[in-house]
Amino acid sequence: MVSIDYRLSDEDTFPAQIHDVKTAVRWVKSIAGEYGLNGNKIGLWGSSAGGHLAALASTTEPNQFIGENPLYSDMTSEVQAVAIGYGPMDFLQIDEQRELDGISEEDPESVQIPKDKKTSDPDSFESLFLGAPILTCPDRVKEANPLTYVKAGLPPFLIMHGLSDVAVPAHQSQLLYQALAAKGNEVSLYLINGLGHGFLNRSNLDEGGPRIATFFTSKNGGGEIIEEKNLLIFDKIEEFFRVQLSK
């Protein structure tokens, strides 16, 4: 596993962050031989803001969002599998969905946000990320929205979201799932009972046993399957990458 980093919004605004992620993927490919890695079998995994960037990196074309004078330009940023946890996918729908869902926080270890904090506020994470209040720059929001770029032929996706997430409503992951499935991509979504924002930050997450989740999957344009699942979250993510990256 390679842990990559990107500039935060107090260092630079969008699209600097996606430039960094794509540069990191190209760099990994450039040093793959030195470290015994397979540069043709790379999975991308991110949660929250990292989930947004993982989705954006894998839905856009390799020649999009590379910046001026890109490093490791003899490599591409294509990946073969993508795992995303509770990432924001359409900034302009987050506030409305919070109000519609009326979610009450059940998870005491989740990342908390102030009750009166809105994505549309000028000092929200999303507005700071874009460099302007999101309601004043809809075109810029669209450019940063992974849903804008969804098409057929994308790598398999695994998406996870807690149903008690008040920071990023689970509807955001449902939007990505629906967009990917509509284009015939292989995608699975787990909506997990009782978990709030940030659950993938916990190394002891699975020590309490399996979690109950509603599972949605659509494979290559086939019919959708919906069922209840009991899962160990990190085991499921590891299984996803092992299966997809061994093809």
Image (tube, rainbow, N blue to C red):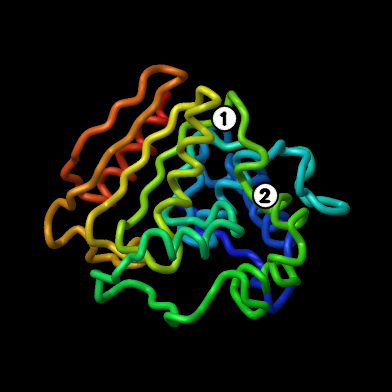
Q: Earlier in the sequence, mark 1 or mark 2?
A: 2
Relative image position of residue 116 (x, y in whole percent) = 48, 81
**Mark 1 or mark 2, which is nearer to you?**
1
Occupied quadrant, residue 193 = bottom left
SS state under label 1: loop
How far apart marks 1 and 2 lie (CA) works out to: 16 Å
Q: Is residue 230 left or right of residue 64?
A: left
Residue at the limit of the structure toward the left, as seen here: 209
Rendered image: mark on residue 205: none
Rendered image: mark on residue 22: 2
Rendered image: mark on residue 154: 1
Q: Is residue 71 above or below residue 222?
A: below
Query: In the image shown, does 16 or 146 lie closer to the viewer?
Result: 146
Rendered-image quadrant of the C terminus: top left
Occupied quadrant, residue 29 = top right
Residue at the limit of the structure toward the top, as seen here: 222
For image coordinates 76% across by 62% down, the residue present is: 137
Question: Label 2 neighbourhood size at 10 Å, few (<14), some (14-19), many (20+)?
Answer: many
Task: Please name the amino acid that badge 1 sits on.
Answer: Leu
Query: In the image shown, does 225 or 135 lie closer to the viewer?
Result: 135
Residue at the limit of the structure toward the right, as seen here: 69
For image coordinates 87% across by 52% down, the residue present is: 69
